[in-house]
Amino acid sequence: MSSSAATATINPNIYDPISNLDKQCQQPLGRRVVVVVNVNHACLVPGGVDTVLRSERGRSAGRTIMEEAVDTSLIAEDGANGMINGIKDLSVSDVGGTGNGNPFDFLKEENTITDSTSNSGGGRSRSRGKGRPFKLATFGAKIKNTFDRGVTSIAVQAQKVGGDNAEIRDVLTVGAYIQDASKGGELICLGMTERVDMPSVLYDAGVGDVDGITFQVPILLPPHVVDSHLANPNSGSDIQFHLWMRSGAAIFAKNRALRRYVWVGSSTLRLATYGQMLRPVFTRPFAISLSLQSTVVVGGAMNLTAVPDKKFPALCGIGWSLSEPRIDTAYISVPGKRKLFNPPLDQSYIYTLPKRDPAALQTSQDMILATERLTESSVVLPLAAAFTRLLSNATEVSKKHAEGLADKLHCLDGADKITDPMKPLQQGHAHCQIEVHHFLRYPNHIGGGSVHITMNLQRPDSVFENCLASCMVRSHPYDSNLAALPTNNPLVSVPFYPKIVSSQDPRLLPGYDIDFGGGKGQVFVGKVRFQIYEEGAGGVGGDVFSPIGPAGTVGFSPRHLEATVDIDSYLNSATDDILNLNVVDAITGESAGALAVTLRAHTVEGLVDRSSRIHGGSTKAGIIDGGLISLVGMETLMDDEKACHPHSDLTSTSSAKVFAPRDPNATEMQVQADRRKRQLATMGEFLTYDYMSAHVENRSKESKDALEKAETYIAALHTPLGVDEVEHLPDKTKDPRPFRASSSRMDPLLAAIGFNVHLQTFSVSNVTSQPSTGAVKEVPTTLFQNVTCGAPSDHFRGFSSKGSDDGGFAGGLRRLEAFRIVMAEQVKECQDNLIDAVSTYYQIQSQHRVLPGRSQRHIPPTEHIISQIRTSCFDATERLHNLTWEIAVRRGNCFSQALGIAVTMYLSHVSDLAKLQKAAWVELWCRHGFLITFEGLLSAAGKELGMIEDASVGIAMLRMVSVVIVTEGGQLGREHDKVQIIDSPYLRWLRITPSGQGSNSKFLVEICVDDNFHAQRIPPPLKNKKAVQFYPVLYEMGVDIRQWGSNAGANFGKKSNEVPDEMDEDEVGIPDNDFLMALNYDAFRKMNGYAHAVYLCGDPQKIGRLSWEQAHFDTEQQIRQPIHPMLSALHDFIRSSATKIEHGILDEAAYAAARLGGGSAIFCKSGKDRTAMQVTFKQAQFINRFMKSGGNGFSEGETDADRIFSDATTMRVYGTRLPICDKNVGQPLYAFNSLQARFMPDPLKPPARTLAGFLKGGRVFTGGAIES
């Protein structure tokens, strides 16, 4: 077949090799035909494009297509006339220039420019510029084209001088086409292979590859095309496979002629002939050899191997995972059914083993078929639902606990606002009402018409007085006829609710029970001290214009008077008589008058029976079990010598330290700590009611949000699609799904679901094809798998201090927890200052004369220095308390995300029978834990530093998790805690059961599997309810321009304290290079301990054992181990990474994790761009090792870096990672520009054709949804 009009209309340049969701999701799913294309060595035309065109056009041997293409640079491009085989007809006569000589001679030409009145013919003149008007745009275009022609000519001549085509080679590609009857038989492109360079040495006399070229990217025939043509076997439909060639010099030129493809030949596949093999279901692969119809190639052939669609591997087969959904229900749209899952993404690649014997090709062709698949996980959403249910319950418990504390503080610091007096009574408080009627001055005492009175409560459990009220009261001269003064209308009436303190309460002030003998039932409520300040002087009343009385008494010093009443004596008293309290001068101690008051005080017992025994309040108030802080593995940091009241969020375990009795054998340090706790216990509360009431609102909001999450997640699993609901594209979906797009990072409702979580498998099969007989044998051999995801971080809460409620702290969890430790030390420092100030006060008071009735135990509010120190204690304690809560909420969200990633990874390895049969990995998991290695690609600057900090804590929390696989009859937890797993072939339900408290909290994840699957597929060591604990480690290395700038000492984007509007906030922030070093050393110590436990390399007694906990908490590295030989290269990379991007850390960590039988998860900010570069690099490494070793993808030895990069580039262009970008943001491009790509490590550099372009503020200049 010669070049004809049929092929003239085909332009291979138009075909877009980038896959997207539309291509991946063609219906019916799983029905495509994978066609592996091989062209034999006869198709490799010596001379390439030049030979093909000379053969067709009869050109002289002295001129090449490149030279002639240069001559056409000024001809109008892409015209319909003069096109042959998609190439401009080079025989057209109006060619400017020869392409020889000096390519810049055009700069010396003199062009005659005429005015608009010149007469000119209608045709184009061969003398440029003569006889036609001057047009600047046309002239500029000519200059540009001529300059391009000159540059291209230089490239052509340089190639000639080089003498060989070793560096600049022509490229081949094959396209599959079918006629479209609706468009008059126009050929429609079904797919194309990648472009392959011609071999530098062609096969000749036993030299070269006798197999010719096997294209790495197969052609996928769409199911609807094949089915529609097979439905009519008499239609004579066929698929044409065209072999195209393009000049290698195209990379030098902007000339489109050099970029066009020339047709070499074609082969035809008759669909009717192979219909019986493809229908009704294509399950058995076959091979066929088709002759190549060509005018230039003799003996050419295309060898096609047709393989069934690899989108859905066989259940329990290589490439299938226990975590993926079932095929028959998960991806089918049913009216009313909520389709939770998006179809898998897949792409196959071919790798050949070359032969040296020409006869071997006639008998068989050996290939390696590797299939890359990305599937969503069926356990991500159920795990998020189960854990958010725990979070909801725990947050509700914490909310009620805070409400209880607020109520108690309300009694002491806001009693006038209490609307239900019964509530304090039921909580162990007394209800008191004190009324002040008047003040009577004794004779011979000067005084004004009114006095200022402050009432302070002297509590039996606090050295600090509580101010109850402050008011003005009338002052009268003393009259023996007291009945003449009115008492039925008190001037002030103050309710208050003092705590009832028993004689056994450890907070009772030392000696209080001895001095006061105990109240009714040996309980104490306290006293009220009245401070009376005379506002005026003289017997006629005060001057309203002067605070010190009339002018005649100027010089008189107002006195400070005091009176005291013991509440304990009037508890549940039946009388309401007026009490005339003795008022004394605070300086002289002389009696100065009487204060008429009425006091009523009763307890809850007194409301029923005034003679009944009064019970004191709880001595262990503040204890809480099942709260959020404890659930997420935290301690309050206030259960040691800093313990103060109220005891917020103490668990029964941590409270044991607070309320522990004195140890007679305690060390001096323990004695001092115990003495300090008893001192703090006498200083009242360190949280205020105003703070606690606001904090209750915060906890109430979090409780409501957690409940909404739990209910919404559960509903998403079971509730059918509503009448008004519609299914959105994945990047637009905002309701809970197993797949959460990276564009939804700021959605608070989805904060507990990991985003962009996929299991990426790379399954390898050996394929032997026999074109002569059509037989094909495919043998699955091995599997390589990774989980890819976005960083498990709480993006909604952010990483800056703007608008935060935690006192202005910025960063992620690791930094916030470091701040929390610092704040705990600040609390301790403030407490020390307060203890010292109180001690000093008592020393000074001991030197003064004791007034009658004055308490030596209590400190009045007028001691301003002590009050300021006490206020600083309040502030420090409240900030620590609030930050602890904020961290707890954040930990819950980050852990929930990490949990879904980790369990998905674990299940994928449990179902990898090929791996489990090769080594006793399961026994090692049961003994030492399942190693989970996270490979982070975030930069240690700006927001991404906060994401690393979040992820590091969330990942470390996975150590709290153990997983057990059970059957329906072997469940361990409560029935109503189960969460159903939807659309899974073998998984039934899961349940998360917490245990322990605080830092000892643990989670048992039960996963129920089908009974038959459990009996046949679950390894014996995992049966009998054997739990496997997770062993998480995190390695981090920034790989983009931000990390480069950080290492270079530059703080990009931070020119001032303010962020420019056009600057992406991710780029702003102070880099922290030491943090990455510390993080990687921490991960190394853990992995080194695991390696020594799994692979012994010496005497265990001498090496010692280092547990995960010891490596994590032993920051001083008191326990040391020698570096395991398997990890020596990793250690060297970490040690040398202080000031550079060292990708070798991630490379070696991933390699070591695989050799240790563990799993890997790769993440960046969104899980789609940098993650794509890393996972494709790892897959290329794996297949390179596999081929070099003859079947072991984790073998040791040198690898071919150039081949690895080439294979990774193919995967990045043709594989599944660009559809992932489409799935997340609606555009199949990587969010890099050429500048960013330049600073990435060489193994991770993205292909130029896949870049989104220059970004501004995280968006493409021209719009779209690409993220930076």
Image (cartoon, grey):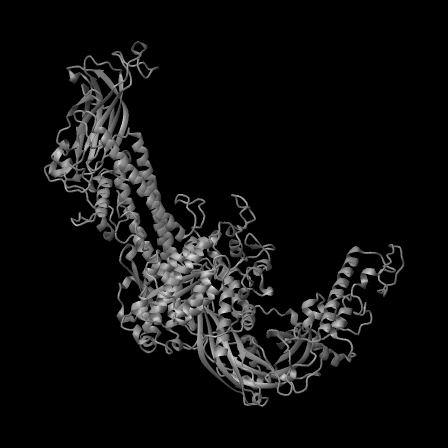
Which of the two residues, 871 or 1264, is positioned nearer the viewer here? 871
Percent from the top left, x then y, of residue 373?
48, 71
Q: Quadrant of the N terminus?
A: bottom right
Percent from the top left, x then y, of residue 188?
63, 74
The residue lying at 26 percent from left, 34 percent from top is: 838
Q: Is residue 331 above or below residue 1050?
A: below
Res 1120 visible: yes
Which of the two residues, 1102 or 506, is positioned nearer the viewer here? 1102
Q: Is residue 375 above or below residue 726?
A: below
Quadrant of the image occupied by residue 47: bottom right
Residue lying furthest left in this view? 611
Quadrant of the image occupied by residue 166: bottom right
Percent from the top left, x then y, of residue 125?
86, 64
The residue lying at 46 percent from left, 63 percent from top is: 1133
**451 displayed left or right of 1054:** left
Which of the two residues, 2 or 576, is positioned nearer the viewer here? 2
**649 displayed left or right of 583:** right
Percent from the top left, x then y, of residue 136?
79, 55
Res 308 visible: no
Residue lying furthest top in this view? 552
Which of the two residues, 164 or 1027, is positioned nearer the viewer here? 164
